[in-house]
Image (cartoon, rainbow, N blue to C red):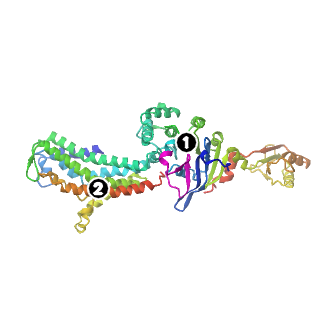
């Protein structure tokens, strides 16, 4: 969890946020703290309550319990004061298919009574330019590809200068070039001082652009903090490649390490692969990596490979939310 | 949809023009008068479209207001803009009202136009026996269109409320149209006479008073009062529903 940050420096703060649909608790006591100026990755498997949380933040749905503060203001009470400063992409883009891309943006912009109509044309043009859609501005949205709609959705979030951007799955449906562009767009927005809240299930993406992240599972917030803090939450492990797997396992267990053979089976060259969690960050004592190697060699184990593996965000994610299709529902 | 409505008077005028003669007393009221005076095309067309065509088109437009946005998914972006829920509802109702005004007006004007093109136009004998010139007759025609527009306000409000209940626009449209039919069926059952003055469709056809000299405004006012009541009740229901609604589409 993050160190206590003064409330004024949080762009998004939820306390005990809950939402119940019938019998199902879609969001269950979520306490998010998104620091101002951060690029915040909001992770979770499909159906873990990410989009519902975003809807609650934006005042689209009323929480069953708990509260939301956006940019230091209470939601949904201060909705009209806050939302003009917030750009959002919620659960995929949605447009009027019979209107052109530019006309769609005009319409959404006109829906906000707080922005000046005089600058509308220029703002629509620059938003389209920012997502690389200038050439398709006058094309009907019906004829747009999924990626183009996604970009138009992002352009809609950028129609006015924003202090906070809430982007739900912004790279969904984009090709690798589009994904890269969105990444650089998010970086440039953050460089301009905006807080960017990105929900995603693409971990690699979050690792590349985010400074902070939170992980949702089955409606609960299971972890949040800076990326570094999240990675440290997991344990590093040692990896031993040896043909004498049996002896090596004995040695390791004598050292107090619970070794496990790799699920992948034999390593190339006929050796076995053993994994063991590396206890503690303290590099001293019996279980220090170098001491482990010495003990293995002393016992006559032919060590072909030895490595300390740091947990990736993905390992951490899977550890927190479940393996394969057995994701906690 | 306005084009479909415009087709009604055209169809009537062409059909009457092509048939040799219309036996008096058969078909919709005023039909036999068309050959003598083209302005009656407008009156006949409005009379014909009151039971189904006008409520149908108004039901489609009013039912689509909120549910259509929800179905497209654009409702969430309008609210996040933020459009404001009350403001959005008012704008949507204003749109439905604009259509309810335009629909009978199109029928009346296209009817008068095609009537003037295909038949002679002259002084009109009113129900009270007085005779008025063609210009004044056109005014009466517009007055009837206004009467119908007012008549459709209640239905528009019902459609708006239905539209806040669902994310499927077709559902809201269908239930609004069905309600207008149910109201008319109930209005036709003599056993339910106590209920009749409260049905929103009860005064829909009572615009004959506007064809007297001097004009009897009574039915116009009663109708306006009833429609105002429906707008108030269903407007409040729509407000209550929409302001607290979780937008999950």
The answer to whether residue B164 is left or right of residue B2 is right
The answer to whether residue A134 is left or right of residue B220 is right
Q: Are both tags, 2 and 1, on one chain?
A: no
Q: Which residue is mark 2?
A: B228
Q: Is residue A209 magenta?
A: no
Q: Which residue is mark 1?
A: A165
Vertically, is A307 above or below A219? above
**Which chain is mark 2 on?**
B
Res A142 → quadrant? top left
Which element carries disc 2, helix, strand or loop? helix
Q: Position of residue A255 (x, y in %)?
A: 86, 53
The alpha-carbon separation of the residues under discs 2 and 1 comes to 43 Å
**Which chain is mark 1 on?**
A
Q: Which residues are magenta?
A: A60-82
Q: Residue at x 68, y 47 (%)?
A: A314
**Badge 2, how many Cα within 10 Å: few under 14, some, many 20+?**
some
Q: Residue at x 56, y 44 (%)?
A: A169
**Badge 1, how many Cα within 10 Å: few under 14, some, many 20+?**
many
Q: Residue at x 9, y 44 (%)?
A: B123
User: Can residue A77 be seen by looking at this rendering?
Assistant: yes
Which element carries disc 1, helix, strand or loop? strand
Please identify the residue farthest to the top as the structure is shown. Answer: A135
């Amino acid at each position: 969890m993050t160190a206590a940050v003064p409330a004024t420096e949080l762009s998004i703060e939820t306390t005990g946020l809950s939402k119940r649909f019938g019998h199902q608790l879609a969001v269950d006591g979520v306490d998010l703290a998104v620091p101002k100026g951060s690029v915040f990755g909001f992770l979770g498997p499909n159906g873990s309550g990410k989009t519902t949380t975003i809807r609650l933040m934006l005042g689209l749905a009323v929480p069953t319990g708990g509260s939301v503060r956006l940019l230091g203001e209470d939601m949904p009470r201060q909705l009209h004061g806050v939302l003009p400063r917030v750009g959002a992409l919620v659960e995929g883009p949605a447009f009027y298919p019979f209107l052109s891309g530019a006309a769609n943006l005009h319409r959404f912009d006109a829906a906000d009574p707080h922005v000046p109509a005089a600058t509308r044309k220029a703002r629509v043009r620059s938003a389209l330019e920012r997502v690389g859609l200038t050439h398709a501005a006058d094309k009907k949205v019906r004829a747009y590809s999924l990626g183009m709609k996604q970009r138009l959705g992002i352009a809609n979030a950028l129609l006015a200068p924003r202090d906070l951007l809430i982007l739900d799955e912004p790279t969904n449906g984009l090709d690798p070039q589009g994904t890269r562009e969105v990444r650089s767009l998010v970086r440039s927005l953050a460089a301009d001082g905006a807080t960017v809240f990105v929900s995603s299930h693409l971990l690699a993406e979050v690792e590349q652009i985010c400074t902070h992240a939170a992980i949702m599972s089955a409606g609960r917030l299971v972890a949040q903090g800076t990326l570094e803090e999240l990675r440290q939450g997991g344990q590093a492990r040692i990896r031993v490649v040896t043909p004498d797997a049996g002896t090596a396992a004995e040695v390791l267990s004598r050292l107090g390490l619970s070794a496990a053979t790799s699920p992948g089976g034999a390593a190339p060259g006929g050796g076995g692969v053993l994994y063991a969690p590396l206890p503690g960050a303290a590099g001293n004592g019996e279980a220090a990596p170098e001491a482990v190697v010495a003990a293995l060699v002393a016992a006559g184990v032919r060590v072909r490979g030895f490595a300390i593996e740091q947990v990736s965000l993905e390992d951490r994610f899977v550890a927190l939310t479940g393996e394969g299709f057995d994701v906690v529902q | 949809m306005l084009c479909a409505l415009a087709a009604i008077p055209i169809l009537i005028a062409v059909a009457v023009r092509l048939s040799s003669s219309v036996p008096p007393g058969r078909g919709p009221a005023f039909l036999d008068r068309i050959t003598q005076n083209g302005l009656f095309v407008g009156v006949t067309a409005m009379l014909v479209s009151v039971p189904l065509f006008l409520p149908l088109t108004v039901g489609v437009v009013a039912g689509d207001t909120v549910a259509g946005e929800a179905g497209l998914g654009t409702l969430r972006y309008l609210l996040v803009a933020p459009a404001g829920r009350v403001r959005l509802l008012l704008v949507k109702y204003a749109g439905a009202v604009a259509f309810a005004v335009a629909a009978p007006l199109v029928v009346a004007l296209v009817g008068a136009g095609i009537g003037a093109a295909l038949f002679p136009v002259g002084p009109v004998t009113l129900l009270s026996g007085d005779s008025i010139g063609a210009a004044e007759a056109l005014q009466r025609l517009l007055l009837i269109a206004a009467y119908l527009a007012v008549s459709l306000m209640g239905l528009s409000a019902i459609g708006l409320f239905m539209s806040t209940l669902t994310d499927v626009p077709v559902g809201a449209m269908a239930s609004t149209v069905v309600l207008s039919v149910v109201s008319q069926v109930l209005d036709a059952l003599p056993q339910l006479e106590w209920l009749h003055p409260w049905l929103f469709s009860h005064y829909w056809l009572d615009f004959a008073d506007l064809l007297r000299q001097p004009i009897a405004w009574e039915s116009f006012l009663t109708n306006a009062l009833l429609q105002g009541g429906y707008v108030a009740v269903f407007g409040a229901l729509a407000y209550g529903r929409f302001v607290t609604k979780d937008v999950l589409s």
